[in-house]
Image (cartoon, rainbow, N blue to C red):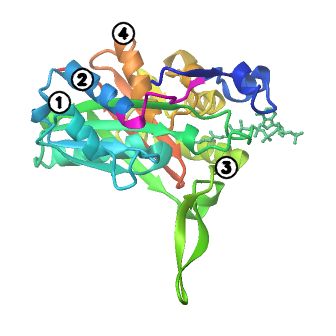
Amino acid sequence: MPSQTLNNEQLSLKVETNDAWIRSRTGIISRRVIGEGETLTSLCCQAGKEAIDMAGWEPDSIDLIILATSTPDDLFGTAPQIQALLGASNAVAFDLTAACSGFLFTLITASQFLKNGSMQRALVIGADQLSSWVDWNDRRTCILFGDGAGAVAIEATSPEKCGLLGFKIKSDGSRGDCLNLRQEASHLPLTEGRTYQKGEFSPINMNGQEVYKFAVREVPAILENLLKTTDTDPQSLDWLLLHQANQRILDAVADRFSIPHQKVLSNLANYGNTSAATIPLMLDEAVKDGRVKPNHLIATSGFGAGLSWGAALIRWQGPL
Ligand code: COA
């Protein structure tokens, strides 16, 4: 996590809002913002190194690094820098963009290389710096987001020990307008009769109510589908690990399956919505404080811009 915190009171000095409103509508109390001396790349390296150390790996034994991010330090790709800084000299490294579904999509993508036998070890990182892309004068969006990075080390294993028991992923670009971060088309003169479009993005644009409705409709639907196809009783889940967007969304999804709220992992009060980072950050916290134990059954779901969403059923193995 970035070291700089920004709580609701501090934010209300910038935009017209207040702690009670933000808490009651979202559950968020504070968030982290990358400040001077830190970068997204440095957070990714820190998270990646911790994950590699927990797994007991040598960096040069990693075959693949995928960084889920919508806010790279380098539009050409940030993952290769992370590969170099971690000393993962044998790994191919690339970025994958799927906004708040990014970590889940990346985890599933990486696992396909492991399942088909072409690779053995992968480092999956989810990281975003939305503080650079929100309009800090728009109280409808700036209260929601924070910065962060999380990482998970995954390794190929025998089919009977495989921790990824099933997954579903979906996209619907026709509804993409309710949450986007688009390039603005400003045409500038190039030479006689020729123009070019300057590369500039407008800040995050969101229709909060539409996104809310999308999340509370689609996340339970895809989870239900996944649980059915994997023949899993919701009551047998140890944990529900959802993208940390809003406490009301988390509670609504849990209620749809009559899952007690104690089984819903949540740390968004402290960090807000860190986009691709929420799921690995939450998992890391719950593994380190002993809530998530080896052999626990976890249903996870990511959802967000695109629109994109997905779910996975995981039997947590822990460090082998
Ligand atoms: N502080 C105080 N008041 C605010 C405010 C803020 N930060 N933001 C909006 N308001 C006001 C509005 O102006 C409006 O006032 P009005 O009734 O006088 O017009 C009122 O609060 C209600 O606004 P509304 O936009 O209807 O609130 P809401 O109940 O839909 O909550 C969100 C807004 C953003 C919290 C909610 O829609 C949400 O969580 N959506 C999902 C967003 C999300 O998770 N995005 C990321 C997905 S990955």
- Identity of the residue drawn at 42% across and 34% down: 39
Sequence-wise first label, 2 or 4: 4
Sequence-wise first label, 2 or 3: 3
Mark 2 vs mark 1, CA separation in Å:
8 Å
Sequence-wise first label, 2 or 1: 1
Q: Amino acid at mark 2?
A: Gln
* Mark 2 vs mark 1: in front: 2
Q: Amino acid at mark 3?
A: Met
Query: Residue under circle 3?
Result: 206
Query: Residue under circle 1?
Result: 161
Query: Which secondary structure type mostly characterizes the magenta part of the structure?
Result: loop
- Identity of the residue drawn at 46% across and 44% down: 101
The circle on residue 317 is 2
Sequence-wise first label, 1 or 4: 1
* Mark 3 vs mark 1: in front: 3
Which span is picked out in magenta?
A: 31-41
Query: Residue under circle 4?
Result: 290
